[in-house]
Image (tube, helix red, strand yellow):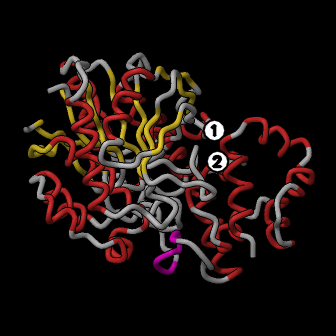
């Protein structure tokens, strides 16, 4: 368990453009600089948002990382829910899911909104 | 008296980044109009610099060396750290106010052991407010942080003292200074519960805040706040510090819980500056 190191990896990645370059060019070299478990290293290699969430990565750090990976908003929320389904409840920190994973946004999926906008234009 | 404006506003990244996903566009535009009025009020105050009391999200400070309070004394700041396409705010350079900020820091230090920083990267917690309040990025900014992310967090009574110290500091300089506190009230951002808002809790907090009822504000307990207002509720510290600085009563200029895609009860308020 090295949540501190895992979060530090993502913290430095999120805020530092040179680390972002290393992340894209040689992720193994970057991973080797941190004291991470196999599970944590694999979560980073695979961009496994759900597992990183369950491991207890601070939600703000994880949100910025998901944005860096180019994950759409509703997909990102769904990945966290799927992580809880697959790996169980959040193990650390203060960003645990409070209910059964229901959606609190009435806006729905981005593509549905785009469809509605297109329909609106057509009318 | 050189504190010429004090107010509060929300800063959630969705406010800019997910503007296109809003269904209630009428409510969204009312919110944007309230933010623009706040910009106008700050400009009309004649402020020469803007203090932004923020609750940053790991753009600068981490658990290797986490300050309870920090004041930016840099010459320039860069932001946002986030993907500009995600936040829908372009990367930009923002002027600081190094001389003024250093004098303010020295005065604050007479009563509160604040950290200071010459380097500071802005995340959405400051960039979203600036996007609306100083859209040309031409006003000198003094970033101030209260740790609301990495527990243990500073207690609310100390937060009040920090806000009061900022006020004494502003009153000790000849420049006209504006101040905003920016945070969320109840919200569960960056969790699957994003969009959850406890509106009655928000309304009660805003009532205490705008009456500037110190005792009622400081009676919140973090454990209860976490249960009822989420981890995002810890950011009430920024509002409490602003109230302590203003000393006067406040006026709620906008609030809605009807924009859950922004993941926060969207708030704009101003305080009267009292002795």
Q: In the rendered image, which residue does mark 2 sit on?
A: A67
Chain letter behind tag 1:
B
Give the camera-side residue of B183 and B4: B4
- Give the secondary structure at mark 2: helix
What label sits on residue B269 in the rendered view? none
Residue B3 x/y as whole percent: 20, 29
- For marks 2 and 1, give the CA distance: 6 Å
Give above or below for B85 relative to B252: above
Give above or below for A32 relative to B126: below
Residue B271 x/y as whole percent: 15, 40
Give above or below for B260 relative to B163: below
Q: Main secondary structure of the magenta part?
A: loop
Query: The N terminus of chain B lies in which quarter of the figure?
Result: top left
Please tell me which residue is depicted at 24% across the width and 61% down the height of the picture: B202
Number of callouts? 2
Please tell me which residue is depicted at 54% across the width and 52% down the height of the picture: A112
What label sits on residue B83 in the rendered view? 1
Q: Is residue B220 magenta?
A: no
Residue A89 x/y as whole percent: 60, 82
Q: Residue furthest front?
A: B110
Specify start and end residues of the magenta stretch as a single range.
Answer: A94-100
For label 2, the crowd category at 10 Å Cα-Cα, with few meaning under 14, some 14 to 19 and many 20 or more, is some
Q: Can you see residue B21?
A: no
Chain letter behind tag 2:
A
The answer to whether residue B110 is left or right of residue A73 is: left
Query: The C terminus of chain B lies in which quarter of the figure?
Result: top left
Q: CB under 8 Å between callouts 2 and 1? A: yes
Q: Are marks 2 and 1 on the same chain?
A: no
């Amino acid at each position: 368990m090295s949540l501190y190191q895992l979060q530090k990896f993502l913290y430095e990645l999120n805020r530092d453009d040179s680390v972002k370059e290393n992340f894209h060019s040689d992720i193994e070299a970057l991973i080797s600089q941190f004291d991470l478990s196999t599970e944590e290293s694999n979560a980073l290699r695979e961009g496994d948002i759900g597992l990183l969430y369950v491991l207890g990565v601070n939600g703000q750090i994880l949100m910025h990382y998901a944005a860096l990976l180019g994950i759409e908003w509703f997909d990102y929320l769904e990945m966290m829910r799927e992580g809880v389904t697959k790996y169980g409840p959040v193990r650390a920190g203060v960003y645990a899911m409070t209910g059964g994973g229901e959606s609190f946004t009435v806006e729905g999926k981005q593509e549905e909104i785009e469809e509605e906008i297109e329909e609106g234009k057509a009318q | 008296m050189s504190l010429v404006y004090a107010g509060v506003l929300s800063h959630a990244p969705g406010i800019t980044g997910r503007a296109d996903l809003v269904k209630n566009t009428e409510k969204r535009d009312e919110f944007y109009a309230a933010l623009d009025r706040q910009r106008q009020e700050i400009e009309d105050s004649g402020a020469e610099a803007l203090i932004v009391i923020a609750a940053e999200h790991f753009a600068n400070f981490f658990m290797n060396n986490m300050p309870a309070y920090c004041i930016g004394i840099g010459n320039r700041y860069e932001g946002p750290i986030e993907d500009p396409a995600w936040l829908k705010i372009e990367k930009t350079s923002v002027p600081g106010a190094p001389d003024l900020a250093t004098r303010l820091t020295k005065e604050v230090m007479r009563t509160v052991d604040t950290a200071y920083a010459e380097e500071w990267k802005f995340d959405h917690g400051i960039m979203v407010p600036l996007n609306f309040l100083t859209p040309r990025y031409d006003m000198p900014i003094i970033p101030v942080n209260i740790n609301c992310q990495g527990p243990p967090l500073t207690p609310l009574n100390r937060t009040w003292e920090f806000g009061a110290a900022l006020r004494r500091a502003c009153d000790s300089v000849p420049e006209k200074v504006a101040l905003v506190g920016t945070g969320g009230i109840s919200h569960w951002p960056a969790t699957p519960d994003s969009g959850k808002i406890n509106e009655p809790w928000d309304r009660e907090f805003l009532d205490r805040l705008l009456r500037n009822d110190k005792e009622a504000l400081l009676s919140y307990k973090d454990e209860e706040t976490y249960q009822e207002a989420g981890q995002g509720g810890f950011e009430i510290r920024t509002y409490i510090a602003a109230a302590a600085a203003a000393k006067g009563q406040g006026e709620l200029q906008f609030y809605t819980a009807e924009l859950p895609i922004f993941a926060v009860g969207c708030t704009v308020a101003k305080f009267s500056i009292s002795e």
